[in-house]
Image (cartoon, coloured by chain):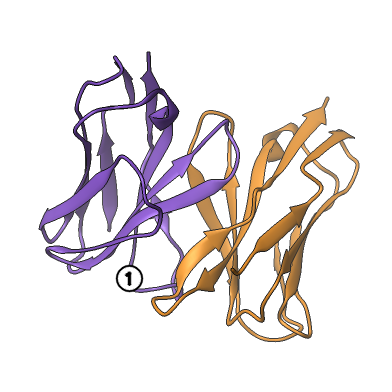
């Protein structure tokens, strides 16, 4: 079946360093979404990418959707302690288009 | 604005006991509703989804069931809990399919002992 894979599983960075997480789908996606889950919290929707090659920015966060619409990345510039959490990518699957989530990348930031 | 409520926040239940988790959405009508389970603080597994009252689709065969008795109410149930049912249960809603972001409830942390 369709799979959405994320790497790395864990990333430990020093505050101020950059961070990137990568998402790969086994099938072409109509769109891809990114979520952030703070420790002990619930996932919160960050953004949706729809177009091939699309790049969107939210302050220090840059999201990219691959040309083939099978991969995506999230890059954080100059991480801060507030960036701590798990970042999930998700893509639609099945006839209803329900989201299938990657396993997430857990980011820890050392002050 | 739309809000989603999920309760209880935490629950400790003995093996073999029943379960009922409730989720309600306010501020919208005919939402798509979802139940996800997150084990060991990691990946999200879709358990059930519903596109309307009384319409439930199961993604994974398991010891759980879901019901949607009202438009904005989604209930997750079990007749007899197993140890393996422990996890973090999340309810979510969306306007429709994957064209819109999902909004998650605050979750229920279930421990079966």
Q: Residue at point 19% right, 54% down?
A: B26
Q: Position of residue A26 (x, y in %)?
A: 70, 72
Give the x, y percent position of residue A15. 86, 33
Please give the name of the residue rendered at 32% of the width and 70% of the height, measured from the top-left corner. B95
Q: Is residue A43 above or below residue A84?
A: below
Q: Is residue A107 left or right of residue A3?
A: right
Disc count in the image?
1
Look at the image and tell me whether residue B23 can be seen: yes
Instruction: Compare residues A7 and B113 and report the one nearer the observer.
Output: B113
Reply above or below: A6 against A26: above
Tell which chain the image draws in purple: B
Name the image quarter holding the N terminus of chain A.
bottom right
Residue located farthest toward the left when viewing the structure as drawn: B69
Hue used for the chain lettered A? orange
Picture coordinates of residue A75, whole percent (x, y): 80, 57
Residue placed under numbered mark 1 in the picture: B95
Disc 1: which chain? B
């Amino acid at each position: 079946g369709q799979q959405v894979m994320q790497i790395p599983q864990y990333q430990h960075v020093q505050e101020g360093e950059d961070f990137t997480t990568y998402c790969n789908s086994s099938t072409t996606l109509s769109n891809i979404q990114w979520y952030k889950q703070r420790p002990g919290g619930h996932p919160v929707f960050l953004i949706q990418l729809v177009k091939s090659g699309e790049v969107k920015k939210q302050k220090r966060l840059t999201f990219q959707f691959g040309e083939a619409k099978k991969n995506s990345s999230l890059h954080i510039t100059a991480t801060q302690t507030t960036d701590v959490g798990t970042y999930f990518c998700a893509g639609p699957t099945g006839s209803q288009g329900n989201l299938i989530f990657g396993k997430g990348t857990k980011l820890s930031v050392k002050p | 604005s739309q809000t989603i409520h999920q309760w209880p926040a935490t629950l400790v239940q003995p093996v073999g006991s029943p379960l009922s988790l409730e989720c309600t959405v306010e501020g919208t009508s005919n939402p798509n509703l979802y139940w996800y389970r997150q084990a060991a603080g990691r990946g999200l597994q879709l358990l059930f989804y519903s596109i309307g009252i009384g319409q439930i689709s199961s993604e994974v065969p398991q010891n759980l069931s879901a019901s949607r008795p009202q438009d904005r109410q989604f209930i997750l149930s079990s007749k007899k809990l197993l140890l393996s049912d422990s996890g973090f249960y999340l309810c979510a809603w969306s306007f429709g399919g994957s064209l819109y972001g999902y909004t998650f409830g605050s979750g229920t942390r279930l421990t079966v002992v």
